[in-house]
Image: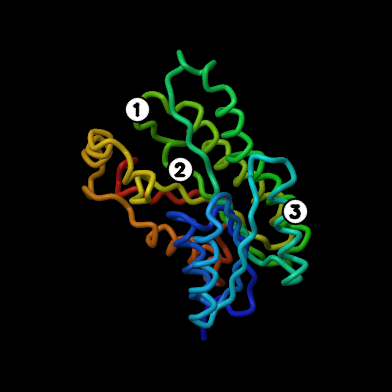
Amino acid sequence: MSKLNEKVAFVTGGTRGMGRAIVERLAKEGATVAFTYLNSDQVAQQIVDEINQNGGKAFAIKADGSRKGAVGKAIEDAVILFQKIDILVNNAALSVGGTIETSDERSHEYDRQIDVNIRSVTEAVRTAQKYMPDGGRIVNIASVGGIRIGGPGLSDYVATKAAISAYTRGLAWDLAPRQITVNSVEPGATDTDMLQKADEAVRQHYMNAIPLKRFAQPEEIAALVNFLVGDEAGYITGSSFTIDGGISA
């Protein structure tokens, strides 16, 4: 019997990298999975079709996390279909780099980064908890950058991720009376399309700093998330789990 049978999961940013791996893993474990995406209708439908063809159930909802109310509405749309949300995974994020000297030129991008990385997460939690039975699970995807800065030009991005880790700890207290656990996962350099497109010098810089001398695979992040949303993790809450190949050791 699959571990997440009869559970309904909602994942933000579910068509790429870690998000896609999380969607596919939770569906494989038996959960009905609704997920958001922004750009690729074709990829979103492909993921839904593959999960459904393999005996699972998935539903894609187009939503721009930078727009106030979009994620909340997407969750409410999922509830109309599935009646509840047992599991919430806040994965969608935006990374805007740049030195402090160029910050004025990027102000719009920085504002959007805060909307996606912080505001939409709080919106998702506040909406989902209304429809979450006691004993639900919330996992926020943060970043090892919240505790270890890998280089210059990342200050605004890592600030948003550190905020999510702190928000997680506060939520653990707020939702404990309902036995809803809240944890964060803090990945290091992960072999997603974003890292694959990076300059080779950047990739080598990160690789040199990792004791295990390899990047994480999205499926490894998904495996940790899968554990945290399962029954065996019922006594874990308010914790941050670094999965970075030892870079922060």
Q: Point out which mark residue 222 bears.
A: none
> Residue extending furthest front?
42
- Residue for point 62% across, 59% down: 88
Q: How packed is label 2: few (under 14 Cα within 10 Å), some, or many (20 or more)?
A: many
> Residue extending furthest top?
101
Q: Point out which mark residue 151 bears.
A: 1
Marks 1 and 2, Cα distance to the nearest angstrom?
Answer: 14 Å
**Mark 2 and 3 residues: CB-CB less than 8 Å, in contact?**
no
Q: How packed is label 3: few (under 14 Cα within 10 Å), some, or many (20 or more)?
A: some
Name the amino acid type tagged 1.
Gly
- Left or right of 97 on screen, residue 85: right
Which sits earlier in the primary sequence, circle 2 or circle 3? 3
Name the amino acid type tagged 3.
Lys
Instruction: Answer above or below: position of 176 versus 85.
Output: above
In the depicted view, which residue is nearer to us: 156 or 15? Answer: 15
Residue to which mark 3 is pinned: 73
> Residue extending furthest bottom?
1
Displayed quadrant of residue 31: bottom right
- Residue for point 39% across, 62% down: 219
Q: Point out which mark residue 143 bears.
A: 2
On-image quarter of the C terminus? top left
Marks 3 and 1, Cα distance to the nearest angstrom?
Answer: 37 Å
Badge nearest the viewer, 3 or 1: 3
- Left or right of 63 on screen, residue 73: right
Q: Position of residue 85 (x, y in %)?
A: 69, 65
Q: Secondary structure at mark 3?
A: helix
Q: Position of residue 156 (x, y in %)?
A: 51, 27
Which sits earlier in the primary sequence, circle 1 or circle 2? 2
- Residue for point 23% across, 33% down: 201
Marks 2 and 3, Cα distance to the nearest angstrom?
Answer: 26 Å
Name the amino acid type tagged 2.
Ser
